[in-house]
Amino acid sequence: MNTKTKEMLINLKLGYLLEYWDDVITEAEKNNLSYDKFLFDIIKKEYEHKVEVTTTNRIKRAKIPNEFTIDTYPFNEQPHLNKKRLLQRYDSLDYLEKNRNIIFVGPAGTGKTGLSSSILRHSLNQGYSGHFVEFNSLMEELLSSIADRSTKKVIKKYTSTLPSKSFHLI
């Protein structure tokens, strides 16, 4: 790849093509692709790369405290939890589309953080934005805001109408 091509790819923010230029050219030559197929493949790979990077960045910004997924949750240890109903909410994301809350209440060690983390991670992977906030941290932030008179700002942060496809998980 020449310097001018590299410069243009950087300016256009075409990260996949910048990183895999030689592989893309080699594959096209090897498979004798038509121009349409070659361009489609490049655009598709660039798109997939951007989606992956965006999702990774959303997950980092969400500050999820662990790597739990719904598959790792020990449902057998929580017999009173309605697994079917929870999985329906998890799969459908209807609570987001209807602007509804999911609240987990229970003693320490029952998996509230794990469930919350897995639901947030799933939502982020589906294109939503969000942020994980533990209740204790939220309370500390609210109490601190009383001292510096920023309570309205903190409350607005968590209650204002959020951009579409975005939410806070507390």
Image: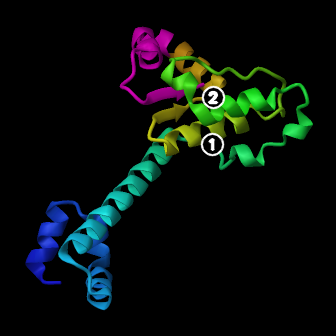
| CB atoms of marks 2 and 1 within 8 Å | yes
Q: Residue at x 21, y 70 (%)?
A: 36
Q: Which residues are magenta?
A: 145-170
Residue at the spot of label 2: 134
**Residue 56 as seen in the image, left or right of residue 114:** left
For badge 2, the amino acid type reads Glu
Q: Which dot marks residue 65?
A: 1
First in sequence: mark 2 vs mark 1 = 1
Question: Could you tell me which residue is drawn at 39 percent across and 22 percent down?
Answer: 162
**Occupied quadrant, residue 58:** top left
Residue 50 - label:
none
Residue 87 magenta-drawn? no
Mark 1 residue crowding within 10 angstroms, few (<14) / some (14–19) / many (20+) = few
| Helix, strand or loop for disc 2 | loop
Give the percent coordinates (x, y) of residue 46. Answer: 30, 63
* 97, above or below 69, in the image: above
Amino acid carrying mark 1 in the image: Pro
